[in-house]
Amino acid sequence: MDFISAIAGLVLLLVAGDMLVRGAVNLSLRLGVPALIVSLTIVAFGTSAPELLISVSAIAEGVPGLALGNVIGSNTANILLVLGIPALISTLHVIDNSTRASYLQMIGASVLFILLAMRGTFDWISGIVLLLALFAMLAHAVYLARCHRSASKAEAAEMEEEEVEGADPGMPWWKIVIFLMLGLIGLPLGAEILVDASTNIARAYGVSETVIGLTLVALGTSLPELATTVMAALRKQADVAFGNVIGSNMFNLLGIIGVSSLVGTLPVEPELMDFDIWVMLGCSVLLGVFVLRRIDITRLWGVVLSTLYILYVLAVLN
């Protein structure tokens, strides 16, 4: 029953997160917020809402290891699995320089995260540092986007018409309100169900909550990123795939752990510092081989990345 409850909680989280994004996006656009700002903030934050709610709920339930394991495991899965599986469908071609700048920011976020983890705990000081770094990155992204828009009126007009994920110009007000209400109710409920079920599974099988966070919960919360990346691969939009993974990893490290550290203290377990954090960093460095050297992720590389993830999960469970 705990496995069924965990799956039900995960499904509720994903559905509620999607509803919250759709409601918030359309409300913001109706209120005149520029599409660019909506894309950089509401969509980015909304799609990571399940991970955030899980982390906060885990702290409230007294299992902070689940929160930290979820973020570290999600970042590892995002690189090895979320890029590996789509590469089995279609080669991901690395052609855009803008991905390189975002990648370097992700590496910076990873290094900052590890340095703070070496303190042995993520407390309110760590939370403030991480959130300041997130704010700086978002401000820099907005600044670059505005500079790019002002470079050409034609480009500006084209970007104004860009589609925003979840946007529906014809959505009535009552539907926007319903989406927001269902999202705000479903997210905390789904998070509580998933955290409780995951904790029971961990105790029943004699493994730590951190291990459950690194595997079951991390894999589940990476499903939205996997779905987005698979669609990008089918549409031959490699930059969307890379951007999705890089952006999600940065927000996981800076935003989710930043907010969670303000809610409660997250102790860093020795096994995380001895193995999992370094695997996460190694995967991030491996991604740089493709991004910085513009090496396409072919089907062969897709097999390699997916296999590495399977080996990682087996290592964690043993």
Image: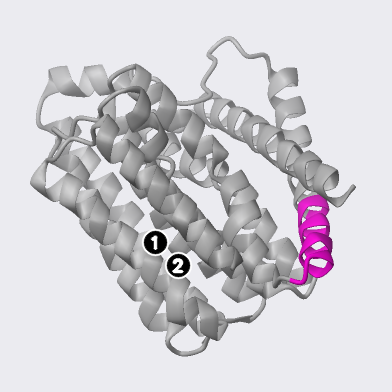
Residue 199 in magenta stretch: yes
Kind of residue at disc 1: Leu
Check if mark 2's residue and mark 1's residue have beta carbons within 8 Å. yes
Which residue occupies 41% across, 43% down? Answer: 306
Q: Which residues are magenta?
A: 192-206
Nearer the observer, 44 or 217: 217
The residue sitting at the bottom extreme is 119
Say which element carries label 1: helix
* Residue 300 horizontal side relative to residue 257, left or right: left
Q: Position of residue 300 (x, y in %)?
A: 26, 35
Which residue occupies 83% across, 51% down? Answer: 193
Distance between mark 2 and mark 1 Cα atoms? 5 Å
Rendered view: 277 above or below 250: below
**Residue 134 image label:** 1
Query: Which residue, given by chain and number where applicable, does mark 2 sit on?
Result: 131
Q: Is residue 185 visible to the viewer in this orientation of the structure?
A: no
